Amino acid sequence: MTTPPADLLPLAVDIAREAGALAYARRRAGVSIAATKSAVADIVTDADREVETLIRQRLDAARPGDGFLGEESGGGESTTGITWVVDPIDGTVNYAFGIPIYAVSIAAVAGEPVPGEWTALVGVVYNPVTDELFHAVRGEGAWLGEQRLAVTREAPAGALLATGFGYDPATHAGDLARVAKVMPIARDLRRMGSASLDLASVAAGRLDGYFERGLNPWDHAAGALLVEEAGGRVGGIGGGPVGRAMTIAAGPAVFERLVSIITE
Ligand code: IPD
Ligand code: CA
């Protein structure tokens, strides 16, 4: 029998809180960079690995047949059709530099654990510094604690937008050219450094829209469900599926404008 999505939420929330508390404690004790990954700027701390290990152990203990796709420890096959897509610390550069904008991101997805093919069931994004926990269950809305979230509905004179830049310097010229194309519709632009919190902010109506090239599945799995459950849209180039090529998230009107500007 398949698991109702809402049944997965308490587990995701409990683990996100425990993982966030661990990340927060390690940050207070002092953090140093353990290694670089895809590029010199792409770093990992011991805390990223320790927090992912904790999340993976908790999920394995509670739901041994589920799959796992995590930033730091890779994948594990699913026998239940459900896979957990996890970023233990989204915003690692902020975390390492002491900027208090980072989150634990945990999603449960059904089907192939490939963006655009999966169906997201549950998403939790938790910032332990602000103690804000965003959650969504498919079909049951997006929430910040007891408060139901809604994306901005009108296309304002100027949209408050956010973006991000990948770690590979070779992609920066293209990213900046895209920013130049988008700026005419922007009130202002934020680069907060945590894709999951950018998406949660769109869901909460704190941002009118967000776009970024180069995201990995764990960066957007939970946040995209938050946006959709808050009445927004998430897509890629031409409004097609999200992928590494592009992630665009916004309320319906700003989404259309961003898709058209970014795709042209
Ligand atoms: C990164 C953050 C950042 C985004 C990068 C991501 P990480 O995730 O979400 O905001 O611009 O593309 O890789 O490395 O901190 O988990
Ligand atoms: Ca990360």
Image (cartoon, rainbow, N blue to C red):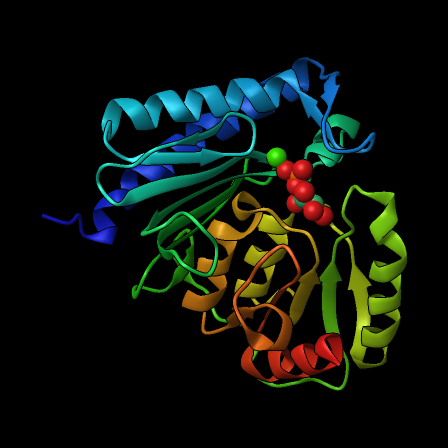
In the depicted structure, whether residue 7 falls above or below residue 26: below
Number of labels in the image equals 0
Picture coordinates of residue 70, whole percent (x, y): 49, 33
In the depicted structure, whether residue 74 falls above or below residue 113: above
Q: Is residue 95 visible?
A: yes
Residue occupying image coordinates x 62% and y 77%: 238
Return the residue nearer the eye: 191 or 238: 238
Report the quarter where the C terminus lies.
bottom right
Q: Residue furthest top?
A: 29
Q: Residue furthest left?
A: 1
Picture coordinates of residue 185, whole percent (x, y): 79, 81
Residue occupying image coordinates x 36% and y 20%: 57
Return the residue nearer the eye: 179 or 238: 238
Residue occupying image coordinates x 51% and y 23%: 51
Residue occupying image coordinates x 40% and y 47%: 113
Q: Quadrant of residue 159?
A: bottom right
User: Horizontally, is 42 left or right of 11 in the view?
Assistant: right
Picture coordinates of residue 120, whole percent (x, y): 37, 55
Picture coordinates of residue 163, whole percent (x, y): 74, 59
Q: Quadrant of residue 251?
A: bottom right
In the depicted structure, whether residue 58 falls above or below residue 217: above
Q: Quadrant of ligand 1?
A: top right
User: Horizontally, is 79 left or right of 127 in the view?
Assistant: left
User: Horizontally, is 181 left or right of 51 in the view?
Assistant: right
Q: Is residue 90 visible?
A: no
Return the residue nearer the eye: 200 or 75: 75
